[in-house]
Amino acid sequence: MRILSGIQPSGKLHIGNYFGMMKPAIELQEKGDAYLFIANYHALTTVNDPSVLREATLDVALDFLACGLDPERTVFFRQSDVPEVTELTWLLSVVTPMGLLERCHSFKDKTAKGIAANHALFAYPVLMAADILAYQSNIVPVGRDQKQHVEVTRDIAIKFNNQYGEVFTIPEPKIGDDVAVIPGTDGQKMSKSYNNHIELFGAEKATKKKIMGIVTDSKGLEDKKDPDTCNVFALYKLFAEEEQCEELAGLYRAGGYGYGDAKKKLFEIMWEHMAPFRAKKEELAADLTGVESILQKGADCARAEARKTLDVVRAAMGLAG
Ligand code: ADP
Ligand code: TRP
């Protein structure tokens, strides 16, 4: 069973990204034939500074490898190292009705936010369909916001198969319902666009400052507190073992324990949890040639698969021979 997902390189990753997306994506390597790529062609629709894109792409690669992605088990690559997907995008465009793309929420949302409506932004779902179909993927784990794009992919694949013969595997989206929304320092969904995020690999001082700034209710030191409505506790739970959670919940309920102490505990547990990942990231950053060769090896494997599909597609459409 082939499981494929892609991640846009869009700035420094935070705790919400980690628990909501990275950790489940890394765990896919236990569940099947996993493909994971950095969607830098897609990022071009919103990032237009080459050095920003280059740096963000490298940073995502380092973060995933540091957090446990095993390149021996997951085919890990940069989207742009498989240019076959852009050819496939054109070939799929032929069977993609305009109406299908006009209905896509993400295009409507982005243009409503003032992002220029260029062709790439409009054709974004067709490139995503090519990513998925090039590798004959069975399962595509994505966030809720991407579900419609996987449905568009299914429509395109079904239409192609009807017109040209059974070429594509029809993929299924897998929505991470089990992953709760991680709250930010103000209690809203953690997001870099709200600036309420805690970076995964932030510096010690900056991380401490962010954590000490988490919004809580105004109960005094002596008051009894409710762990279930507290942002500090919600974040602590992500890192802690069951027993540690119970212990902290007990301190909250007993009173005489302040939010400042809870924040310090959260900082400590997060800092400790991330220590091996930080060490690994440093090690990787000191050997960028090694990282590049991991990505190249992934790309070689992905390219060979995409080539196979593309040859069948070209023949089916009357382009070859
Ligand atoms: P941001 O909101 O910071 O811009 P993105 O939209 O780039 O984050 O999200 C990238 C991935 O991380 C998506 O798969 C998304 O579902 C996941 N993610 C982002 N924020 C959270 C959060 N607060 N809780 C759970 N998952 C999240
Ligand atoms: N559009 C996805 C996002 O922004 C990233 C992506 C690109 C993707 N191609 C994909 C995800 C193919 C899954 C499968 O999150």
Image: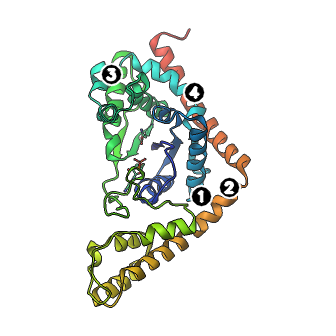
Residue 83's tag is 4
What residue appears at the point 47 percent right and 57 percent down from the top-left corner?
14
Q: As drawn, is 66 to the left or to the right of 198?
A: right
Circle nearer the N terminus (1, 3) = 1
Q: Residue 272's image quarter? A: bottom right
Q: Is mark 1 within 8 Å of ligand 1?
A: no
Alpha carbons under labels 1 and 3: distance apart: 41 Å
Is residue 308 visible in the rendered image? The answer is no
Q: Position of residue 228 (x, y in %)?
A: 27, 74
- Three-letter residue code for mark 1: Ala
Q: Is mark 3 within 8 Å of ligand 2?
A: no
Q: Are marks 2 and 1 in contact (CB under 8 Å)?
A: yes
Alpha carbons under labels 2 and 3: distance apart: 44 Å
Q: Are marks 1 and 3 in contact (CB under 8 Å)?
A: no
Circle nearer the N terminus (4, 2) = 4
- Three-letter residue code for mark 3: Lys
Q: Position of residue 205 (x, y in %)?
A: 55, 69
What residue appears at the point 59 percent right and 69 percent down from the top-left corner?
275
Task: List the residue tagged with mark 1.
Answer: 66
Task: List the residue tagged with mark 3.
Answer: 159
Tell me the quadrant of the picture where the C terminus can be found: top right
Residue 309's tag is none
- Three-letter residue code for mark 2: Leu
Circle nearer the N terminus (2, 3) = 3
Circle nearer the N terminus (3, 4) = 4
Task: List the residue tagged with mark 2.
Answer: 284
- Three-letter residue code for mark 4: Pro
Q: Secondary structure at mark 2?
A: helix
